[in-house]
Image (cartoon, grey):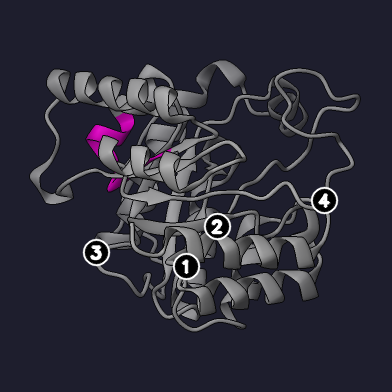
Amino acid sequence: MKLGYFGIGSGPCADPDAAVRVAGAAEDAGFESLWTGEHVVLPDPQVPPSPVPPDTAMLDPVVALAFVAAATERVLLGTGIIIVPQRNPLVLAKQLASLDVLSGGRLLFGAGVGYLRPEFAALGVPFEEKGARTDEYLDAILALWTEKKPAYEGRFVSFSGVDAHPRPAQQPHPPLVIGGHSRGAFRRAVLRGNGWYGFFQDVDASARCLRQLEDAAAEIERPESLGRLDISITPPPGLDRDSAARYRDLGVDRLIPLCPARSAEEVVDFVRRTADELADL
């Protein structure tokens, strides 16, 4: 089972020196990937379902991953997730292609729709249209990355007679990993994703999500070109060898634990202990 670490660019790893230390420790310990999430803004005061207080340090995911890419050589770099409907899709396509090129083809493009109404309101993006907007934006990004003469005509984005280089280093494009636990997210993963990502899901919740992915696969036809859907999970804190084995037995391909730490030293220790405990699963 592949092992990632979630938290680059936030908390202790919003500090540049800490981010480099943790990224290097993870690569040295054999971690397959590093992941970062995003919120452009957070509600102040914090109200449910906001995950963290408004003064939580949280770097832009593309910037944070580009920074640690320069300090690493092999570890993959995952966005877990980018809130796609809040972004201009052509600008995002350029940013992600640039990251993939600069990192030597190490990007995992994790994408989702978002869930914080105050964030959408502050950015001037209609909350009710986020799912449909995400689908169009993803299709537009892939068109820009893969078509010889890129063009797209949609409700929310349209373009033709333009081009953008360089293309991503990975061909035909970096793996697209769809995040989320809604029916729309499961269908989006089956129809468009190379993978699916469940954040903060315990073993039982993960099992329910996998059943819902199976239900979605029974309703819509998955393109053969996508191959098998790769399953990634960030478990709640407290992951141990026994629970990791339960995730593996469910069919989870990648575990991406996080560490609720206050210092780089704690995170580095967590990374090394986790690698030792789960090395041969």
Q: Relative to 252, does residue 221 appear above or below in the rendering?
A: above
Q: Amino acid at mark 2?
A: Tyr
Which numbered disc flags the more N-terminal residue, 4 or 3? 4
Q: Secondary structure at mark 4?
A: loop
Name the N-terminal-most of marks 1 and 2: 2
For disc 4, the marked residue is 57
Q: Name the secondary structure under disc 1.
A: loop
Can you give x and y, in whole percent of width and height, for residue 251 in the image? 25, 40
> The disc labelled 3 sits on which kind of residue?
Pro
- Going from N to C along the chain, the mark reached first, 2 or 4, is 2
Quadrant placement of the N terminus: bottom left
From the image, tell me which residue sits under label 2.
5
Residue 221 sits in quarter:
top left
Q: CA distance from mark 1 to mark 4?
A: 24 Å
* Residue 189 falls inside the magenta stretch: yes
The dot on residue 18 is: none
CA–CA distance in space, label 1 to label 3: 25 Å
Q: Nearer the viewer, residue 200 or 114?
A: 200
The answer to which of marks 1 and 3 sits earlier in the sequence is: 1
Q: Which residue is mark 1?
A: 31
Q: Any mark on residue 172, and which?
A: 3
